Image: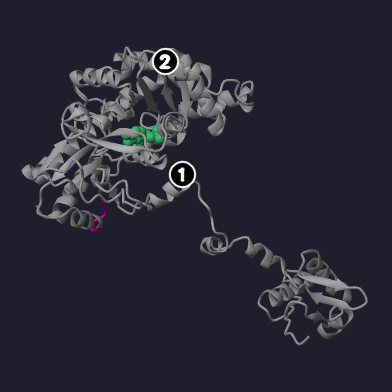
Amino acid sequence: MDLPIALDSHLPQPLHAQLYAELRQAILTGRLLPSQRIPSTRSLAQSLSISRTTVTQSYEQLLSEGYLETIVGSGTYVCAQLPDDLLCSQQVEPSTQQAALPIQFSQQGRRLTEIPFSLPAEPKATISFRYGRPALKDFPLNLWRKLLSRHCTATPNWLDYASDFRGYYPLREAIARYVARARAVQCHPEQIILTNGTQQALDLVMRLLIDPGEVIAVEDPGYLSARRVFLSYGASLYPVPVDESGLQVDQLIHEGAEKAQIQKIRLVYVTPSHQFPTGSTLSLPRRLELLAWAQQNHALILEDDYDSEYRYGDRPIPALQGLDRNHSVIYISTFSKVLFPSLRIGYLIVPSNLVLPFTQMKWLSDRQLPTLEQQVLAEFIADGHLESHIRKMRSHYDHRRQVLVQSLKQHFGDRMVVLGEKAGLHIMVRMNLNLDAKEIMERAAQVGIGLMSAHPCYLPSNWHEPNADLDSNPNSSNANSIDRRCEFIFGYSELDEAEIQVGISRLAKALNP
Ligand SMILES: Cc1ncc(COP(=O)(O)O)c(C=O)c1O
């Protein structure tokens, strides 16, 4: 072996460790090749003028790690397959894996792969008007930590499987009382099934109630994540326009629609308390009209009540569920907006005859939610912390909302229209600046402002075609004279007043109105 090996007895590292490192490096860099014979301990010790024990120690380590192997009666060799190769072989590039293994998808898998999907990019904007999160920095973390620690150290019954897959009973009791007070929802805790947020609730509804090809009426514009679930299960979508009074219920039976098609609508998905994204509220006459329509057409209503706690000024209208006398409403809500989204606790409130099938479907899906968080949340609600947190946050958000609307008016005047400012954690803004949406987004990004287009919320006319880009909608069934491509969702919950003012002023300069 003709290898330059440099050992230095003045270094703090012992000689055997230095020799081990030198030999390992030589193997990994290919200076010593697989299956190459290496000198005996005696000859290497002689050539390096070190003791044979030193060489033996380093060889033993390399043997035990699989870099060397001994062949009895023959000598010591570099292993034919090195441990690092074995480790590397587990990190095969995803593209190579795809090529090696043709995957046969299920029908649902095929539908999924036809819906364009990408992981969200890391936000780069310094001031982002993104929507979706409450003000996480205002969350009462100390209190939550205290409750967590108390439940953690108390009798650890939370470690075990739950006995009721619907969720922790005291939490369901607390929720039943809360929704009765806050939303006029009428239910018994038995009817509540806790879910991993709204998203799982939507998934369970689809799995249990809708077959491929069956029709779901959806608000247009509407909530993209719900639409994606419906499409993945092969549902046929029936877009219904919305206006300042919410879903245009009369469009469920408008002239252009075939009577036969209307009969087939199995489910109407609505966000009546705070229509997403326009922010309108479904008026009381329309609520009653929708309930009557559902009864006549033997359809179910899926009521997504995701952030109705935040109303500024007028009183909330009772939830559809509370007005329903026909057991046709499935009510969904979540703690993502009133507490924090990673809590992943939401709930379904279902008519009594659906309790058992939904419980079974929840069990089938993921057995149960983690118990510890449910225990903490139950106490948080029962002790009044939820409602006091909501009161505090409502006042913060109200202030931020006013600052946002004022700043927009100050800088853009009548070249924009604000929609849905009476509720929620976002407003919708229709811009009229002689710039197209792409240009507006690009100019905003150049000055560090993150904007969210409302465009993907409209159902593209080609939604039923494979690979229809749900995120960039060329035209909508709801299209009229308004240029919907210039509508933006402005979330304000995460920004303080100064950030909002600076953000809008910077945006105005960039757009030069
Ligand atoms: C209309 C609507 N429903 C529900 C949710 C909450 O979903 P989840 O409970 O899965 O976090 C959101 C969140 O953005 C929403 O916009």
* Category of crowding for the residue at label 1, using alpha-carbon neighbours closer than 10 angstroms: few (below 14), some (14–19), many (at least 20): some
Model colouring: one colour
Residue most extreme to the right: 73
* Residue 61 percent location from the top left of the image: 80, 66
Residue in the image at 27% along x and 17% along y: 318
Q: In this image, 20 relative to 222: left or right?
A: right
Q: Tell me if residue 201 comes above or below residue 55 in the rendering.
A: above
Foreground of the two, 372 or 90? 90
Residue drawn at the location 73% of the way across and 81% of the way down: 5
Query: Is residue 1 depicted above or below 137 in this figure?
Result: below
Which of the numbered marks, if any, corresponds to residue 176?
2
Whole-angstrom CA distance, mark 1 to mark 2, is 35 Å
Residue 256 in sight in this render? yes
Res 108 label? 1
At horizontal 55% and vertical 24% (from top left) the residue drawn is: 165
Q: Disc 1 vs disc 2: Cβ atoms closer than 8 Å?
A: no
**Residue 317 in sight:** no
255 falls in the magenta region: no
Image height check: is 489 above or below 94?
above
SS assignment at label 1: helix
Residue 339 in picture, x, y percent from top left: 40, 30
Where residue 488 sits: x, y (%)?
21, 45
User: Residue 276 vs residue 351: left or right?
Assistant: left
What range of the chain is rendered magenta? 446-450
Would residue 447 be counted in the magenta stretch? yes
The residue positioned farthest toward the left in the image shown: 414
Residue located 14% across and 54% down the image: 511
